[in-house]
Image (cartoon, helix red, strand yellow):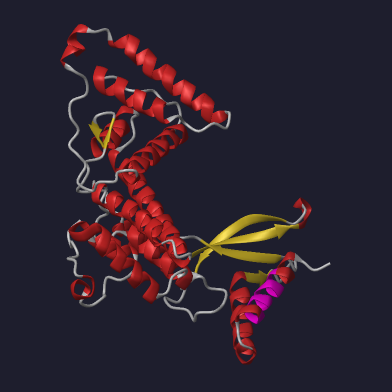
Amino acid sequence: MASSLEIRFIVCVYGCIATSPVRSFPSHGLDAFDDLKSLVTVDSGTGGVALFKRRRSGGEVLVYKRDRSLGGREVPVGKREENWPTTRKTTPLSSNDYNDEKKAKITRLRNRRKEELPQWWPQLLNSGSILNEMINREEYQRMANRLIRAMMDNKMSGKDISENDIIQLRHICKTFGVRASIETANARDSLYRAAINLVLSYCEIIANKSTSVQINGEDARQFIAGLADNIGLENTRAARMVSAAVAARTRSRILQAWALEVQDKHSEALFELSKVCVIHRVFPPEESSPEMEMVARGLENHLSSEQRESILESLFTICGEDTHRSLVEALGLVGIKDSQDKSGATVKMDS
């Protein structure tokens, strides 16, 4: 039976074959063998095998020996210093380049994700009415908690969270200055996503663009931001969830509009695009947002440049001066030239 050492060498050689051209195999094989020799030595007195394992600190090397009396277990027997070269020839065995690239990519993504609230995020008003000093908040706190438990029970039983329950929860918390208690972060996120869908659906049914979107007599932005505070959700996380939902709606409505256009249902296609206009007016994405970049990449896989330009012209017609730059970014047409001349409308460059 092959020893573990032989198996390691075979794996090294196989890695060379799988990842390298045939003509470069001999050189990579020698590199693999050199790596193996630097890790293994044979005790001339006993014939045992000693393994060198380098610490993270650099040149200090621990020496291990397989003790046959312990069933071949590796036992530390000493250490030695070794001057490791500062640079080594890159081989298929080395993953430094891959790790560095991966770390750089993660850093870029983190830098792009600003921990700032979007410009549309409202300044929250003081919760509760002037009667707060005269009422017993404990009763309303219990009401809010009972409502939360009922919504979570419905969720666990496979039912959707009721829109009326969400509106009632916001009303109780806002009017009487109480906060809802939610046991887990997943439950809180699930409730908030349902609330976001509720708000975006309200935006989509608004026929007149000049009409502000209100939910239970409250501005849509104030409603969704206030609810985040009511359930103890961090503002920046809540804003990211809204941005993600806006991106998802943007993508789905644009694809649906084009599908209707292909079926010669032009008026219905325009209605789908009008929903996108309202959503971007109420919750405008930040300029050059990663969410709109992802939407653009997704749409490029389904729609040609000419098709996306056609959709953009329709958006200019529907949205008029309310056509935000974010819609141009969502279609991947930021570099389009003379958009005003082609559509007769002005692209609103601010978000």
Residue at 67% over, 60% down:
65
Residue at 77% over, 57% down:
68
Q: Is residue 67 left or right of residue 32?
A: right
Q: Quadrant of residue 156?
A: top right
Q: Quadrant of residue 111?
A: bottom left
Of the pair 58 and 319, the residue shown nearer to us: 319
Against 63, residue 238 (above or below) is above
The quarter of the rendered structure image containing the C terminus is: bottom left
By secondary structure, the bulk of the magenta-drawn segment is best described as: helix
Residue at 23% over, 48% down:
209
Against 119, residue 128 (above or below) is above
Against 24, residue 308 (above or below) is above
Q: Position of residue 72 (x, y in %)?
A: 75, 57
Q: Position of residue 332 (x, y in %)?
A: 33, 69
Q: Quadrant of residue 128?
A: top left
Report whether residue 288 is seen: no
Of the pair 187 and 210, the residue shown nearer to us: 210
Outermost bottom residue: 23
Does residue 114 show up magenta in the picture? no
What span is colored magenta in the figure?
8-17
Against 75, residue 90 (above or below) is below
Residue at 80% over, 68% down:
2
The quarter of the rendered structure image containing the N terminus is: bottom right
Q: How many marks?
A: 0
Q: Position of residue 118 (x, y in %)?
A: 23, 48
Q: Is residue 330 left or right of residue 128?
A: right
Report whether residue 125 is seen: yes
